[in-house]
Amino acid sequence: MEAVTLLQWAFDAVLGFALLWLAWRALASPDLFLAIVLFIAFGLLMALAWVRLDAPDVALAEAAIGAGLTGALLLAALARLESNNETKAAHEKDHEPEVHD
Amino acid sequence: MSHVFLYALVGTGLFTLGLYALIVHTHLLRKILAINVMGSGVFLVLVALAARARGAAPDPVPHAMVITGIVVAVSATALALALMVRVRAETGRAELSEERPE
Amino acid sequence: MAAIPWGVMAILLPLAGAMACFLSPRRASPLGLITALGVVACAAGLGWQVAEQGAQRYAIGGWGAPLGIDLYADGLSLLMLMVTAVVGLGISVYSSGYFNREKAVNFWPLWMFLWSALNALFLSADIFNLYVTLELLGLAAVALVALAGGADALTGAMRYLLVSLLGSLAYLLGVALLYHSFGCLDIALLAERMEPSPAVMAAMGLMSAGLLLKTALFPLHFWLPPAHASAPAPVSALLSALVVKASFYILLRLWLDVFPVTAAGLGQLLGLLGAAAVLWGGLQALRQTRLKMLIAYSTVAQLGYLFLAFPLGSNVAWQGALYLLLSHALAKAAMFMAAGNILCFGGHDRIADLDRVAQRLPLSLAAFGLAGVSIMGLPPSGGFIAKWLLLEAAMRSGQWWWVIILILGGLLAAAYVFKVIGYAFTQAVMTHEARAVPATMEWAALVLALVAILLGLVAPWPLALMEIGLPFGGEAAG
Amino acid sequence: MNWDGWLPLLIVLSSLSVGLVIFFLPEERVATRTTLNLTGAVLKLVLVGVIIWGVVHRHHYETRLPLLPGLDLVLRADAESVLFVTLSSGLWLVTTVYAIGYLEGSPHRSRFFGFFSLCVAATVGVALAGNLITFLLFYELLTLATYPLIVHRGTDAAHQAGRAYLTYTIAGGALLLVGTVWLYGIAGSLEFSYRGFVAELADGHRAALIAIFALLIAGLAVKAALVPFHSWLPQAMVAPAPVSALLHAVAVVKAGAFGIVRVVYDVYGIEFAAGLGVTLPLATVAAVTIIYGSMRALFQDDLKRRLAFSTVSQVSYIVLGIALTGPIATIGGLVHLVHQGVMKITLFFCAGNLAETLGIHKVSEMNGVGRRMPWTMAAFTIGAFGMIGAPPLAGFISKWYLGLGALDAGQGWVIFILAGSSLLNAGYFLPILYAAWFKAPPDTWPAERSFGRRETAWALLAPPVVTALLTLALGLLASAPFSPLQWARSITTLEYAP
Amino acid sequence: MKKTMNPKSMTESGKIRTPFRLLLMVLLSALAAGLGYAVSTLSSQSPGSGEWVAANLETSGVSNPVTAVLLNFRSYDTLLEMGVLLVALLGVWSLGGIPEQRESSPGPVLDTLSRLLVPVLILVAGYLLWVGAHAPGGAFQAGSVLGAAGVLLLLAGWRLDARFAGLPLRITLTTGLGVFVVVGAVLMLVGRRLLEYPPSFAGALILLIEAAATLSIGMTLAALFLGSRPEAGPDR
């Protein structure tokens, strides 16, 4: 029993930390594509957290909507942003908009 | 103290983290991601605290609230992304112009 | 209870109207107008009901709090609903002339959804349900701003969306904390169970901050002028007149009912911010070169007045703030519509060049002027009654410094209103061929402005309605 | 509910409704507009006649509508209001005739006459207001209705004058509002009543009452053009002549002066105000204004500007009279309210005629004009002598009572003010008269319009002649029943404790 | 904290000055600390309304408490939320002229995948809808799975036939909200309150509403993904 509790605590701690870290990386990553991928991963981990919190309904919704559809929407939007770009230079600027200034 | 408080704290952490990113970053896609992270933080607080009662089944009301919230979030995100693409097409940048009329 | 649930109908009818407009885009305009008339009838019905039988509570699904969601209509929510009905009807009539066919298809369903969200918000007694209505309202409002197209409107809409979502999330986190502190979401139940704790303070801070952001209280107003100024005229009208008031309404409800009013310091802070908004908004309005920007900054200033009631806190002060809210809703809608007419007629809204336009649109200019009278707070107008009540409350409480703010704000308002009005009296000759403005648009603006003036002459009735259900606490009227 | 309860409201509505209808009249419907204007003016005069008759026969005319909890919109015919309402509605009829002639063929007449009617409606409201908040309401309405008339011509000068007018009057209105709210907070009532209603509050609120008095009077002094709040008035003379008449004689300036009467007599009560020590400063300000205005008038070459500074000076006679504590001075002040109006309107009509017919705007252009326009200049001469205070004209009556009243109140210094002012009056009017009658006319006038055999249009000539005759009559028949002098006497008996 | 260590974040956005960022970090750290403290002071005993839900579950028509809350106890929230979805779609559509994604051929893998997956996803959606009454699942989950199927189809280059892109599409999109409102209104017409299901019909009514909602949610999500308003035929 003790060991199980400890293991649960460790799992919770790792999951919590991973959530924060993924969120941070997703928000700070200079590459927008990477940021979106990290965000999708974040969504999947959130689904895991819901399961851990005894919320299977939420987990299902999160997996389907939060990670799946939101991810698809984000990627589609990014693709549209990029298809707007004519030149390579503008393309780079779009990827790392804030690095240069 | 049980693990639910750990998750609740992670939730508040995500909320502030998202808020920071929302203010600091200028690219709209990042701002939209930041809003989503903030939302996840709030949902985490809601659901985590619902599981406080040890042994008993968790309170389903916050679960329903969060499912509602997730759908609202995806709707808002879709609108925001479409707006972002239009802003980009119109202004050439996916940022808010910094010359605020103040 | 066999009574007709007018309140529920005021929510469902515009929803149905929205769907009808969506399903039948070719007939969106007439369908929208019919719905608008229906909603006005519902508001009148509810008004009659509340006036006859007192405050109404309606348990949706028959469950009742704490399990289900209740609708609650007292004097406060009733007046909000009624002013929304009047302004909404005006906006509907105006819009039927304003939008071309293509835009109308998009406008009507969104506007109907927004109206439904407003009514639902004003009637809701459940803090999570309020969150849902806030989101419905916010998304519809953003989409409506973006209808104008063009860089300004789209950037304005984008900023508005982000701010709106941020505000809602802060509010929702507050809801989470309150729910987990007291296990209920109903405002009345929360008020009953309320006891101060760190979580309650945090919830109060979060919810207030989120709602203040949405209400655009100085210095959180930065998003409002670009969004309100760049939207299509009827949308500007409904944003300034109604949408910003919705979040203020929630704040008022929470402040009056849920949170312990021990935070006198916070009241003073809100008052100070309100005062800053009055002065800053007024000065900025004076500096603007575009008419719609001027009106938008005027909204920032007028919203500031609403917060002067918080440090005063007396019945009279709340009545004054609410009266200001009502008359501002009417007057500001009329102003934006008049500006829309001028813009539509002359093709621009540069204030310095208005002289070639203004005198050719006497009705719109009259609407602007009459609305301006109310905004300035000169008699006879709803704005004057509001200012009188606020002044009285400030004098009674001995906090005379708010008197100075109220007076200075009025002088600034006079300065920026007359900056525009002056251009009507000119020898300049119209040089280019103008686009005709439909009579409905001119009259819609004028009628709303007249109602704002009328509010100054019939004050006892709205003030009596306001007291139904004692939304401002147990103090007797007068 | 009988007619007595609605008559005051009807008087206000008679010009308000006319104004609203006129706004929507197409520009070219001259006949309809003229008919409406004159009907409204005559109807109002008839109603005022009814009210005079009724008040004399002890009828009580009061319209009371709820405005706020505890505060009503009250329109009431009492002795003071009858005096003012008679003046303004009588002069309005004359001014309307004059304005119709003056504006013939000019643009935006529907707008002009619409606001013109609103302006008079507001003035009548000011006159009939039965409490301070009703007074405030119409006082502000007057500001709003006058502004479009001042900027009517749309020139830069007009806009500048309009801005000056607004700056002063809106700020003044704000002071009045603060004073009113403060007073309401302390007294809990704002009803005008003979000998005032604040006397019983004197114990705890002496300082507050003095401050409120200062606020109220400052707010009113703006419209009454007391120094140092006077400078909008000379600027506003760029407006068309009928508007000047309205500003100087019928409405705006008079509303300010009448407001001071109300505050001193029916809010504070003259004896209580004197006890509070606030009347002497007021009298001093009035005295300074009298001398200052006359001095400035002396050096103006622009005729209307000279008349405007003359108004600054003359209106302060009214204030001086009511601020001197004593029934005789009060009579002088109140009667001057009427007399100044009748005389000054004559002068402005004449100035307008000169400008319209011959293009004369300056005093230096008036040489020999008496031969070209004898009727106009005859009227002008009567008005000017009245202003100087020559017997047996109306102005003499006013000054006589003011002088006697000053002695009666023990304020001998006032005699010197009056004498000095009269000398100055003579100093700025007599050269005009001399030049007009005795100097040789120039070969051509600046901009002459021909009206056939008459010197100018009927509608322009009749009003000044009528008011000039009235000036004469008010002096000669001062002791007849129902004369302003008798009316002022009866007011005085009500305002001083027996 | 970690964020202060990251040098990249300092340079990433030059528009916002470093002192401001530091100040912001301090303020937000204080906010995080305050919120954390507030959360941690909550009693570890939940005062929630779980017991009420449990007590009324029997009359709700379903046995999954979350579904009971979503579609019965607080169904009004869900009704409005259907409106939120539709409003988002209206907003996206009204923006108009969103550049269509690059017209690249989907490639054989995606094509095959979608052929295989779409029927499976539709089946899953149906299952989730049905099972939602007593186990995890329900309209939203089912709807989003349906939406995912739609997204896959769209990715594979499939487009709605112009014949159905007009009124039929709009009807499908409004079905969820429409059925909800109609059910609510009909209940009011027969003398009950808004959305007050008779206990004997509750299960059926909930299933009806959920089925309609699933269809609309799936369609709406797919339409949101597509972005622009599908070209309708010459008429409707």
Image (cartoon, coloured by chain):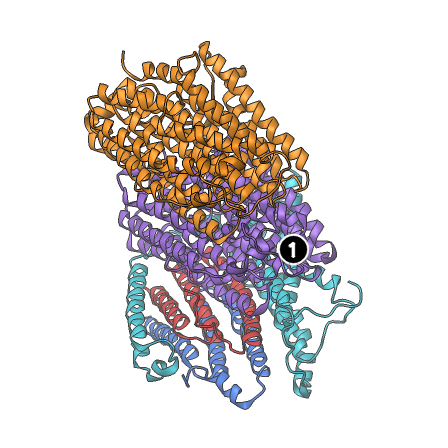
Chain colours: A blue, B red, C purple, D orange, E cyan
Kind of residue at disc 1: Tyr
Instruction: Describe residue C398's horizontal placement relative to residue C7 as left or right.
Output: left
Q: Residue furthest top?
A: D57
Q: Which residue is mark 1?
A: C98
Image location (x, y in percent) of residue C73: 50, 39
**Badge 1: residue crowd in 10 Å (few <14, some 14–19, many ≥20):** many
Instruction: Describe residue B101's horizontal placement relative to residue E178 as left or right.
Output: left
Q: Residue furthest right?
A: E234
Q: Secondary structure at mark 1?
A: helix
Where, by quadrant of the figure, is residue B98 drawn?
A: bottom left
Indicate the quadrant containing the N terminus of chain B: top left, top right, bottom left or bottom right. bottom left
Residue D201, can we see it?
A: no
Residue B19, can we see it?
A: yes
Image location (x, y in percent) of residue E101: 64, 79
Task: Count every numbered label the image shows and give the total.
Answer: 1
Q: Report the front residue among C321 and D472.
A: D472
Q: Report the front residue among C222 and E22.
A: C222
Identify the residue shown where x is 50% and y is 22%: D8
Image location (x, y in percent) of residue B53: 37, 57
Identify the residue shown where x is 31% and y is 54%: C201
Instruction: Describe residue E189's horizontal placement relative to residue B62 as left or right.
Output: right
Q: Report the front residue among D434 and C392.
A: D434
Above or below D229: residue C289? below
Q: Report the front residue among D266 and D36.
A: D36
What chain letter is assigned to the residue under label 1? C
Indicate the quadrant containing the C terminus of chain B: top left, top right, bottom left or bottom right. bottom left
Image location (x, y in percent) of residue C24: 73, 56
